[in-house]
Image (cartoon, rainbow, N blue to C red):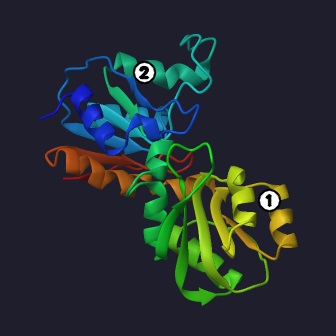
Amino acid sequence: MKDIRSFYEALCRLYPERDACPGDTDGLQICPEPDRPVRRVLCALDLCASSVNAAKRVGADLLLTHHPIFYGGVRTLDPDRHPENRSVCDLILSKIAHISLHTRFDAGNGGMNDTLCAILGLKNVSETGLPDEPRQLARVGDLETPCTPEAFAEFVSGSLDTDVLLTDGGRTIRRVLVVTGGGKDYADLFFHSDADAFLSGELSHHVRVGAADLKKTVLEAGHYGTEKIFLQAIAPVVKRIDDTIELFFCPDTPHEIAICAQK
């Protein structure tokens, strides 16, 4: 059985820190007891009140999230001055560790964008990305059956169980660029690519206008809508490291809190 630090080291062998995008702050972020055995892990998209309470409730040794904390540096954890840090203090006082895998898990094999491609059934998938990325984060692939933008939007909505904002480019969708979460930085890559559609969580008004001018389609399925698949993607990774670990999942949306256990 691995302890907290050795579990993180095993994660890093699969998803090295060097593959994180510049400025990313993910990693082993809270570690009150480095030698504590990892028996129970709660997986969630974010460290927040709901996921911390769930971790405490199930007796988790580790909270494993996609999004990191401490964006922009840490000056204080005083919850009176910074109420948003109250959950961090709660986790520390509960002696539960926290690890996040962010952009390196977006980019890595079997990570967020690979999982999204698999859910959509894309074929001939390849990596693509921005020049400053240590590893290309985005994916581009072909639909098994070309379809209209509206039909593809309905398919995405059903596959991810989420609402989709469609900007219809007016031409058949054959090839799709995907980036989970916030994808507006990849707009220029999309505009110059052979992809007919760009699927991401959230883009911008200017991306929609540019796509429409080029008769290309963009689909926004929500930041949470495209990244709640973290729970699906991370489970086999944890089991690959240690299949005796008991996994719990917390879909930590603001309005929908539930816990399910996987033995």
**Residue at figure coordinates x 75%, y 65% from the top left:** 191
Q: Residue placed at 59% from the left, 54% from the top?
A: 129
Which element type, helix, strand or loop, lies under badge 1?
helix
Task: Describe residue 202's horizontal placement relative to residue 92 as left or right.
Answer: right
Q: Residue furthest front?
A: 131
In-front residue for pair 182/60: 182
- Side of 109 relative to 157 (left or right): left
Earlier sequence position, callout 1 versus callout 2:
2
* Image quadrant where one finds the N terminus: top left
Q: Amino acid at mark 1?
A: Val
For the residue pair 214 and 30, the one nearer the viewer reads as 214
Q: Is 200 positioned to the left or the right of 27 in the image?
A: right
Of residues 96 and 137, which is closer to you in this image? Answer: 137
Task: Identify the residue under disc 2.
Answer: 90
In this rendering, does residue 182 appear at all? Answer: yes
Residue 169 vertical position relative to residue 193 in the rendered view, above or below? below
What residue is at 41 percent from the left and 54 percent from the top?
111
Mark nearer the viewer, 1 or 2: 1
Q: Is residue 28 above or below residue 119?
A: above
Return the x and y of residue 171 as percentages of the image width and height.
Answer: 75, 85
Q: CB atoms at circles 1 and 2 under 8 Å apart?
A: no
Please give the residue where the numbered disc 1 appears in the rendered image.
207
Q: Which mark is residue 125?
A: none
121 in relation to 131, above or below: below
Q: Amino acid at mark 2?
A: Asp
Residue 31 position in % (x across, y down): 33, 21
Q: Secondary structure at mark 2?
A: helix
Q: Indicate the position of residue 36 as horizontal and vertical percent values.
A: 20, 23
Q: Residues within 10 Å of mark 2 (few under 14, many from 20)?
A: some
Q: Nearer the viewer, residue 226 or 210?
A: 210
